[in-house]
Image (spheres, rainbow, N blue to C red):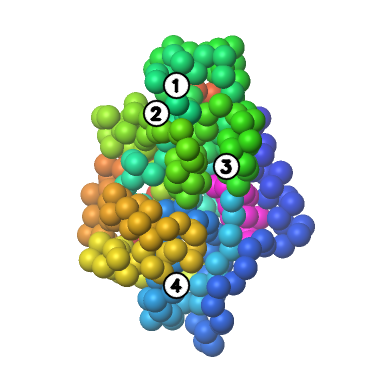
Amino acid sequence: MNENRRRIMKQAATLAAAGSMGFPILSRAAGATVINYGGSAWLGHYSAYIALKTGMMAKQNIDLRWLAFSTSSARMAAVMAGNVDIAGTGVVSALALMASGARQFQLIATPNNFGKAEGLLVRDGVNSIQDLKGKKIGVTYASSSHVLLLDILAQAKIDPDKDVAVINLPATELLTAYRANQVDAAVAWTPTFNRIRALPATKVLMDDSAFSLYKSYKMSPGPDVLLTRAAFAKDNRDAVKGFLLAIFEANAFMTRKPEEAARILMELTSLTYEEQLSTIKQTEWFSLADQKALMDNPGDFVVGLQKLSEMLLKLKQIDSVPQVRQWVNATYL
């Protein structure tokens, strides 16, 4: 069994026994449909957080309960365990489960396109990928950052098992490890990406725009998707539709009023106002109208995900290539 799949299923078993992890952000709305949402401080969750904090979810008669996870694999484990109803996630962990035939979830939308909020961070003196030979690189396994690193190394014909030491670190520990010189370089996503980049004598060597599929398909190594637990959606179809309406209302808000959105999101991310505003502005926030071309029949985004699946097989991150279209349900849009 692939290691990604093994890790996710182990987490699912733990969560099923212990109950869902995280915390509610707002008080419960009487009579509203409860949706347990799997989120984090990554920009893929900005839409849901804005919709929660501004009352856009409540307007759709949704009581959104925020559950925080540090990695996409942990979030997908909670979906598999039945503890999360809707989640935003980097797609790599979802593709690993698709490759194993898991049918507990459906992809329902993609909220954004990013390219500058994740990357390979190095110290002064490292000026090329070749300079990384013999060095220790910290990254969170089974994540978009891990895929980015493996692809960058492959492009440079550097063997990740022989030429460098790739160290698996939880996203929450990357900053500490880098600052303590336990690793020579790190691959991270925002907000950890921003915090490492701000350290003295540190620079971004490459970001997601260096990824092979980004050049051809504008596909990042772990694009953001919104997915729902299939059993939940079957019984709560209108709530899933309402959730998406709130998400794309929030996207329009971030596009029109990035300054106001930045002030709200600082509570989630702990970024400075300038960092938060920059992250919002450098991200393309999709509209509801965009989704048909991206997700439906089969959609440009879905075609790109298929290409990404093929790449993940070559990088030995999954055991087989799933037919991604079988997991897409665009009827909630």
**Disc 2 and disc 3: Cα gap in Å?**
17 Å
**Is the Cβ of the residue at disc 1 closer than 8 Å to that at disc 2?**
yes
SS state under label 3: helix
Q: Earlier in the sequence, mark 1 or mark 2?
A: 1
Q: Which residue position is annotated with label 1?
A: 126
Q: Residue 151 or 165: which is nearer the viewer?
A: 165
- Callout 3: 10 Å neighbours few (<14), some, many (20+)? many
- Callout 1: 10 Å neighbours few (<14), some, many (20+)? some
Tag nearer the camera, 4 or 3? 3
Q: Which residue position is annotated with label 4?
A: 52
Q: Amino acid at mark 3?
A: Leu
Q: Amino acid at mark 4?
A: Leu
SS state under label 1: loop
**Disc 3 and disc 1: Cα gap in Å?**
18 Å
- The image shows residue 151 at horizontal and vertical percentages of 43, 24
Quadrant assignment, res 15: bottom right
**Is the Cβ of the residue at disc 2 closer than 8 Å to that at disc 3?**
no
Magenta range:
71-84
Residue 175 is marked as 3
Check the image and report above or below for 300 versus 272: above
Magenta-colored stretch includes residue 245? no
- For the point 49% across and 63% down, the residue is 268
Total tally of numbered discs in the picture:
4
Does the image show residue 106?
A: no
Q: Which residue position is annotated with label 2?
A: 205
Q: Earlier in the sequence, mark 3 or mark 1?
A: 1
Image position of 110 (left or right of 134): left
